[in-house]
Amino acid sequence: MAIDFNFTDEHDELRATIRAFLEAKSHEDAVRTAMASERGFDDAVWKQMAEELGLAGLIIGEEHGGAGFSYVELLIAMEEMGRALLCSPFLGTAVLSSNALMLAADETTQKDVLPGIASGEKIVSLACAEPGGRWGLEGVQMQAALSGDECSLTGTKAFVLDGHVADVLLVVARIDGGIGLFRVESDASGLRRERIPSLDLTRSLATLHFDATPARRVSAGDASAALERTLALGVAALAAEQVGGAQKCLELSVDYAKTRLQFGRPIGSYQAIKHKCADMLVEVEFAKSAAYNACFAAAEDAEDFLESAALAKSYCSEAYFHAAAETIQIHGGMGFTWEHPAHLYFKRAKASELLFGDPTHHREVLAGLVGI
């Protein structure tokens, strides 16, 4: 399906507004302060994102207090956030959980939770993956215990975005006949949450332990299709974020190559550095095309969206990691130091490569979708 990637003047204005905000609120010092905090992000910045820019409710419908925008606008926001290494619950709450609620949850739950997300008052985490590390629904082993109207969950969920601070947990578990989505309150009995050490200090992950924890089923019937699409939408958004990070790595490298002198010449005048920067540019542009294709396909509800998302995550993961690694190489010894931001992009790139499944996983998904 041919998709037009043209942006409107309004899109350009949105990008400029978000970039200006992030340059003021997510500069390097702010990132380092936020990632070292107990919650892993700045609550004041999160509230500003929600109240002043409307970002927390960007894709939430107006009937639930959101802006009602599409994945084109989300693409712009994610790209800018990736560029700025924003420490925020945006991906877990405003993207993954919002989509899960809109696609799989009942109307009562939508009315109760979505306005809180849009206003920045609620942080919500989707708990799908388990310690086995498989991100697809086939990796879900937790079985919900159902008895009439009563429901409880026992087991462990891993790699939960911002799960240590979430006000509401959306838990994916097996039911007779398929997969269900369950709501668990943060103060529920039998629930234990722990923030886990992560390579990427700018993004918080948690492990959740459930021991006969009371839950409420919020999906009707088998929610597999809705949750599969939810995960694919998360993948497309993450690909856009990866593109933003890769673009920033390219900019850092080119700027340094122009100003760093060696033997009286800018290092960018040497063939080896020129070729590195040229290769990075090609990969970033290809990654941008893949991510844009996935997000525009999501916005247009294209038939091949799932394929586009898997392709984008596979390619963008490798392009971002390569760009981050080359940035360190181009900066030489300085690029390896704690004081330089290159290592923060490198760690984000590697962790993002694994989040929601590595490139191999998504190539397998793509192969299955196209019948190979």
Image (cartoon, rainbow, N blue to C red):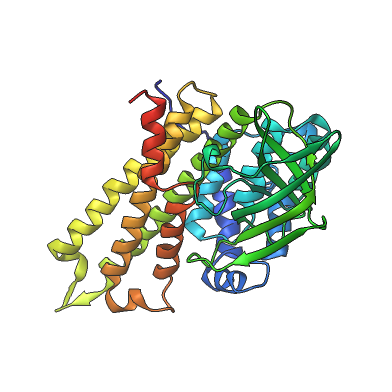
Judge whether 155 appears above or below 99 on screen. below
Of 272 and 224, the residue lying toward us: 224
* Residue at the (66%, 41%) spot, across then down: 173
Please state the total of marks drawn on the protein image. 0
- Residue 245 image offset from top left, x and y in percent: 43, 55
Which quarter of the rendered picture does the N terminus lie within?
top left
Judge whether 151 appears above or below 203 on screen. above
- Residue 211 image offset from top left, x and y in percent: 74, 55
* Residue at the (27%, 46%) spot, across then down: 282
* Residue at the (52%, 33%) spot, across then down: 8
Picture quarter containing residue 314?
Answer: top left
Of 190 and 102, the residue lying toward us: 190
Which quarter of the rendered picture does the C terminus lie within?
top left
* Residue at the (43%, 30%) spot, across then down: 307
Of 158 and 279, the residue lying toward us: 158
Picture quarter containing residue 149?
Answer: top right
